[in-house]
Image (cartoon, rainbow, N blue to C red):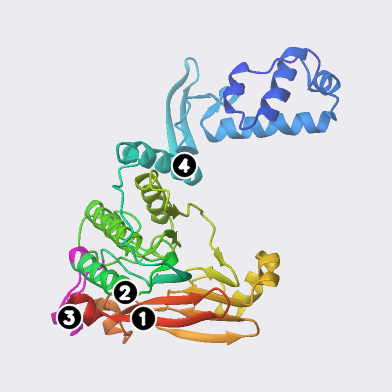
């Protein structure tokens, strides 16, 4: 930049970091990139790169006066292109601005909106009293496979069962009640949602990856409302049996974005309950340590089962070395499969939902059940309770 060249002060609002803002302000104050670099004790190239990044961001938001772009777009939109009509004497007459959704900014805006919408529910959970049994030094892990709330199944089509959000609620409630009643009163409880808790991720009712249309039983608003209350019921029931409960919600391929607000909604609702720990974490892999037991949780649509032990050893090297029993909890395939590798077991869990019309036609069927796993602090997995869907209906 030549000495004396002015920088548009409006560019300051497009700085993403304080470092960018500092460099841009120095250019404005000093009148050139070189002078700003000398003032800041930086290389001129570093300062120029910061200016270029800010300009690029401004252009993506629709601001580039040198190109007759002066209409700043909202944070959730990005510039896709423009068409401008010029008159040879009067100059610019009309301009059409084409936009696209800025995915990252859109996700941030959605989460902020969820926070605002849920603010009135913050800390609303009523105190749940422990049932009073003498606690056992152990861990009970309740594992809910792909629940697919909002999926539609019609018995006449599938020859199996009807299914919608209300039925999903009753089945999950029944399975949780049965498993909590059957569980020993261990001090620690763990509630794992392996992902695909929701059949649809938004009101388009399409899969994120391939855009396939899904059979949905209800409006998206009803689906998420019913599911959240089903989770609240489950957590409160588990608190009756266990002194402390940790809740992990993994993101599935059907609900990759919805999982974020599920975590957030539950964390706000149970904010005033010290016996509940709702894990709020966007990571694909979650880990839980109970003395000599190390558990990993992931949906199962990413790394293969054979790869998960080495992922655990890599991401949790210290805990791997300190524990004797290591176990991955996954879903996705709707079948119960257990594979044992050196130093680690990997298990996928069943769903409580029946096959919909497409999966029935394609011949995809699986047992429908929910499990709870009982871990001893020294010896690892020592018992298991199973609730088939028939018992959950009772």
Q: Secondary structure at mark 3?
A: helix
Among the two numbered marks 4 and 1 on one chain, the one whose residue lies closer to the N terminus: 4
| Residue pointed to by mark 4 | 108
Which residue was labeled with disc 2?
179
- Left or right of 67 on screen, residue 90: left
Instruction: Mark 1 and mark 3 in contact? Answer it, CB < 8 Å.
Output: no
Cα distance in 3D space between marks 4 and 1: 40 Å
Q: Position of residue 185 (x, y in %)?
A: 38, 69
**Which mark sits nearer the N-terminus, 2 or 3?**
3
Between the residue at mark 2 and the residue at mark 4, the CA separation in whole angstroms equals: 37 Å
The C terminus sits in image quarter:
bottom left
In this rendered view, identify the residue nearer to me: 137 or 226: 137
Return the x and y of residue 240 as percentages of the image width and height.
32, 61
**Comparing marks 2 and 4, which lies closer to the viewer?**
2
- Point out residue 3 in the picture as x, y percentages from the top left corner: 81, 15
Picture quadrant of residue 174: bottom left
């Amino acid at each position: 930049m030549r000495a004396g060249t002015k920088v548009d002060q409006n560019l300051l609002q497009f700085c993403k970091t304080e470092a960018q803002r500092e460099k841009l302000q120095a250019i404005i104050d000093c009148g050139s990139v070189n002078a700003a670099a000398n003032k800041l004790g930086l290389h001129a190239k570093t300062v120029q790169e910061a200016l270029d990044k800010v300009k690029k961001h401004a252009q993506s938001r629709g601001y580039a006066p040198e190109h007759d772009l002066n209409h700043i777009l909202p944070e959730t939109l990005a510039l896709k292109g423009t068409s401008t009509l010029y008159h040879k004497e009067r100059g610019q007459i009309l301009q059409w601005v084409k936009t696209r959704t800025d995915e990252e900014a859109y996700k941030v805006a959605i989460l902020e909106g969820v926070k605002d919408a849920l603010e009135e529910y913050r800390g609303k959970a009523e105190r749940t009293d422990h049932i009073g049994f003498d606690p056992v030094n152990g861990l009970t892990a309740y594992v809910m496979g792909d629940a697919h709330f909002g999926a539609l199944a019609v018995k006449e089509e599938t020859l199996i069962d009807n299914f919608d959000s209300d039925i999903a609620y009753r089945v999950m409630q029944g399975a949780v009640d049965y498993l909590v009643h059957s569980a020993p009163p261990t001090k620690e409880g763990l509630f794992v949602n392996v992902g695909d808790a929701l059949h649809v991720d938004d009101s388009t009712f399409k899969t994120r990856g391939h855009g396939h249309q899904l059979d949905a039983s209800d409006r998206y608003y009803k689906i998420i409302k019913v599911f959240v209350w089903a989770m609240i019921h489950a957590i409160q029931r588990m608190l009756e049996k266990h002194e402390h409960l940790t809740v992990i919600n993994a993101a599935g391929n059907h609900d990759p974005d919805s999982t974020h607000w599920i975590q957030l909604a539950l964390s706000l609702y149970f904010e005033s309950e010290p016996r509940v720990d709702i894990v709020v974490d966007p990571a694909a892999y979650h880990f839980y340590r109970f003395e000599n037991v190390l558990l990993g949780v992931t949906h199962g649509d990413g790394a293969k089962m054979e790869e998960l032990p080495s992922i655990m050893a890599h991401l949790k090297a210290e805990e791997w070395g300190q524990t004797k029993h290591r176990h991955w909890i996954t879903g996705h395939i709707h079948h119960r499969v257990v594979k044992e590798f050196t130093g680690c077991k990997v298990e996928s869990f069943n769903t409580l939902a029946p096959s919909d019309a497409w999966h029935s036609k394609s011949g995809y069927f699986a047992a429908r059940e929910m499990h709870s796993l009982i871990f001893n602090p020294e010896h690892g997995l020592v018992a298991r309770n199973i609730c088939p869907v028939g018992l959950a209906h009772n």
